[in-house]
Image: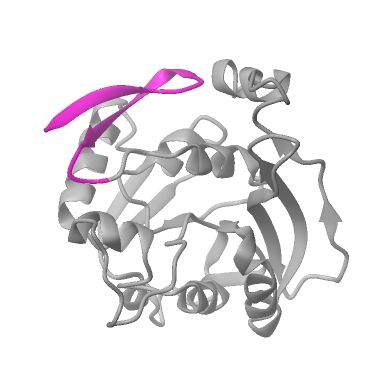
């Protein structure tokens, strides 16, 4: 069943969603706000865009063209309905294609900025997954792996282009090593904590292709305090993300 929802924290953006697929997550909203967007950026791509949540939010931060790439046709249709509803046809384009097939001579070394909220969990043919196929593709590395995403990003990015990801902390060293091996220099990291007494669950990453070494670890994003109340930063994020 399709529904038209508000995007939390954004008064002038709505999104179509379907219970057959995962709803957009806080992870994607934070990523769309975390990533640096430069005035000089001309080509922005969101890999595995799903229902288009990241392009929809980033369109409030830039007037540059944004391309979303998504392998599942029904999600592409949902994304296009949202784009039309928000009158963003001239800015956002969604391609129904495997991101591996987007890597061709016309697109190599052409992209200024890539964002991606990748599948979090590794997958083998012996794994038993209780989710539907549609949801499993979003959560597990069935169609694409983190290694492939970072390799694809290296091929698409211009020299000095940037990659921004959100990843589980248990894959921290794997992700940074993959980036280093693909000429993407880690530049910014921010960890997310559910509350001060818990370990970090996710981290947000931004790296530069062939960038100089020098990593900045930003202050943590803590969602709830010790009394399980939303922190001021989280409350502000949910109500006024765009300044």
Which residue shows up at 75% across the image and 36% down it? 196
Out of 159 and 14, give the one closest to the viewer: 14
Q: Residue furthest left?
A: 1
Out of 104 and 183, give the one closest to the viewer: 183
Residue 243 visible from this viewpoint: no
Residue 238 visible from this viewpoint: yes
Residue 24 in magenta stretch: no
- The boundaries of the magenta stretch are 1-21
Quadrant location of the N terminus? top left
Out of 154 and 121, give the one closest to the viewer: 121
Q: In which quarter of the image is residue 215?
A: bottom right
Which residue shows up at 86% across the image and 71% down it? 213
Left or right of 117, for residue 51? left
Residue 10 in magenta stretch: yes
Left or right of 30, for residue 233? right
Please provide percent x and percent y for residue 160: 70, 67
Left or right of 144, for residue 212? right
Which residue shows up at 57% across the image and 33% down it? 61
Please provide percent x and percent y for residue 49: 37, 52
The correct choice, above or below, for 128 with respect to 8 in the image is: below
Please provide percent x and percent y for residue 106: 40, 76
Q: What is the magenta segment's predominant secondary structure?
A: strand
Q: In which quarter of the image is residue 70?
A: bottom left
The correct choice, above or below, for 233 with respect to 27 in the image is: above
The correct choice, above or below, for 36 with respect to 100 in the image is: above
């Amino acid at each position: 069943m399709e529904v038209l929802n508000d995007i939390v924290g954004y008064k002038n953006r709505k999104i179509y969603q379907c219970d057959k697929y995962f709803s957009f997550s806080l992870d994607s909203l934070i990523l769309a706000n975390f990533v640096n967007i430069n005035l000089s950026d001309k080509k922005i791509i969101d890999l595995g865009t799903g229902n288009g949540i990241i392009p929809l939010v980033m369109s409030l931060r830039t007037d540059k063209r944004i391309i979303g790439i998504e392998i599942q046709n029904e999600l592409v249709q949902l994304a296009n309905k949202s784009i039309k509803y928000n009158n963003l046809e001239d800015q956002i384009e969604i391609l129904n294609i495997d991101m591996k097939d987007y890597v061709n001579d016309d697109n190599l070394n052409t992209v200024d900025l890539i964002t991606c909220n990748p599948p979090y969990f590794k997958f083998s043919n012996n794994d038993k997954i209780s989710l539907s196929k549609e949801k499993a593709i979003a959560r597990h590395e069935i169609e694409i792996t983190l290694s492939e995403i970072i390799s694809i990003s290296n091929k698409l990015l211009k020299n000095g282009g940037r990659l921004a990801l959100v990843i589980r902390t248990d894959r921290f060293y794997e992700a940074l090593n993959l980036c280093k091996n693909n000429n993407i220099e880690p530049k910014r990291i921010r960890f997310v904590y559910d509350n001060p007494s818990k370990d970090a669950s996710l981290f947000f990453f931004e790296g530069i292709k062939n960038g100089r070494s020098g990593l900045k670890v930003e202050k943590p994003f803590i969602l709830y305090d010790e009394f399980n109340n939303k922190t001021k930063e989280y409350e502000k994020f949910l109500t006024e993300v765009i300044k």
